[in-house]
Amino acid sequence: MAIYQMRFLNKEELACVLEKIGADKRCLPFFDNKREIKSLFLSDVDVRAANIIKQEMLSLGGDAAVNSGTIDCSSSHSHIILFGTKKQLLLFSNKIKTMDWWGLPEIAKEVQTAVTLLTDKPHFLKLPHGKDIELNKKTSLMGIINLTSDSFYPESRTKIDAENIRAKALELIKNGADILDIGAESTRPNAKRIPEDKEIAAISLAVKEIRNILPTTPISIDTTRKNVAIVALEAGADIINDISGLTYEPEMAKVAADYNALLVLMHMRGTPETMNSMCNYENLLLEISDFFEEKIEVAEAQGLKRSNIILDPGLGFAKDYNQNLCILRNLNAFDTFGMPMLIAASRKNTIGIATKSEDPKERLDGTLAVTALCSWHNIDIVRVHDVAENKRVIMMTEAIKEISHV
């Protein structure tokens, strides 16, 4: 008898193997609930609740890692890691929601929501001008159009004139870009701001020119200024890519809501001039999650629907080398929000350090490795300079993911 390990990436792959062994088709939902052990981090739980959580998870065949001071209540609170299948976690949340002590009903609700959202992400992003973006099928490519004179990768810079802008847009689409992201202000470390009127002029020209020749292409605007966003949306843009995550101008969410546009919420601290000195975190992933939760509430309060929000953990923005790698190692950490994820790592310094490539020109292969990783982990959008090469990497990765067991 031969034995080998199996890992099922999705429900469809599991169904294929069950069919091969002759299992009853009606058993698929039951086995799908047991297909994968999920690990959920809960922060600052009352130690009395932590004791109950530990025991209830054990009773269901799961487990919970708690602070060593939990059993004798020598600690007042504990972070917790839950380990369980989807079925176990849902049974757990259904059971503790009836226990009206120490925040257990609220924990039950949060766990149930997180587990549901992990497997219930949206299928489409609806846009005000461009065609809808299909999710869950493959990783989409966001091609970069830099209308800046000081971006960190000189080869990405496009002159601010109609002919060059049109040519760059057509080149990116020909090479396989699904979305175009236009920026007129550099956000590299230590970059200084440009006057708002200069940014408006460049963005307005670019959006109008691109929309004229590419009427259905999704267009994103990389800006932190609401006035720039308004001009761009009036000209035909679909997405506001706010690297400040509503930190600079919280009213940006209302602008997105008014135009039914999408909003990319990116995590960062400080400004491009100060962010490299603000990389101190006690728990990086937890603090990014807290940031997202806070900013999503800000956006919703201004009328923006959750279905119009994309999350970006902000590689290179107030993160050092190890912190950027931690995010890449945990790409699915924020799937509990049930929102599309965007990763922007193209030719950044972390890739340079990892591959000993000081010049951004030499960082393509490292970028492609990150794109393959993102595609494998079902990241919805990757933002890149080199569309053709990244497109081929995604095609290869998707081919591996989609093959049936033979």
Image (cartoon, rainbow, N blue to C red):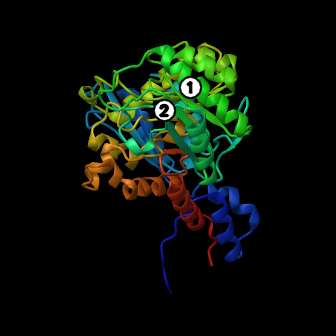
Q: Secondary structure at mark 1?
A: helix
The quarter of the rendered structure image containing the C terminus is bottom right
Q: What crowding class fits label 2: few (fewer than 14 Cα within 10 Å), some (14-19), or many (20 or more)? A: many
Residue drawn at the location 63% of the way across and 29% of the way down: 207
Q: Is residue 7 above or below residue 264?
A: below
Q: Amino acid at mark 2?
A: Leu
Tell me the residue that label 1 is attached to: 203
Q: Secondary structure at mark 2?
A: loop
Residue drawn at the location 56% of the way across and 39% of the way down: 164
Q: Position of residue 363 (x, y in %)?
A: 35, 53
Residue drawn at the location 60% of the way across and 33% of the way down: 162
Q: Is residue 222 above or below residue 156?
A: above
Answer with the quarter of the image where residue 256 lies: top right
Depth order, front residue of 66/338? 338
Q: Do callouts 2 and 1 mark residues in contact (Cβ within 8 Å)?
A: yes
Residue drawn at the location 40% of the way across and 29% of the way down: 186
Q: How many marks?
A: 2
Q: Position of residue 197 (x, y in %)?
A: 51, 14
Q: Do we see residue 250 in this rendering?
A: yes
Q: CA distance from mark 2 to mark 1?
A: 8 Å
Q: Position of residue 265 (x, y in %)?
A: 51, 28
Q: Amino acid at mark 1?
A: Ile
- Give the left or right position of residue 1, taking residue 268 as reference: right
Depth order, front residue of 252/31? 252
Q: Is residue 208 above or below residue 248?
A: below
Q: Position of residue 384 (x, y in %)?
A: 48, 46
- N-term mark: 2 or 1: 2
Tag of residue 147 = 2
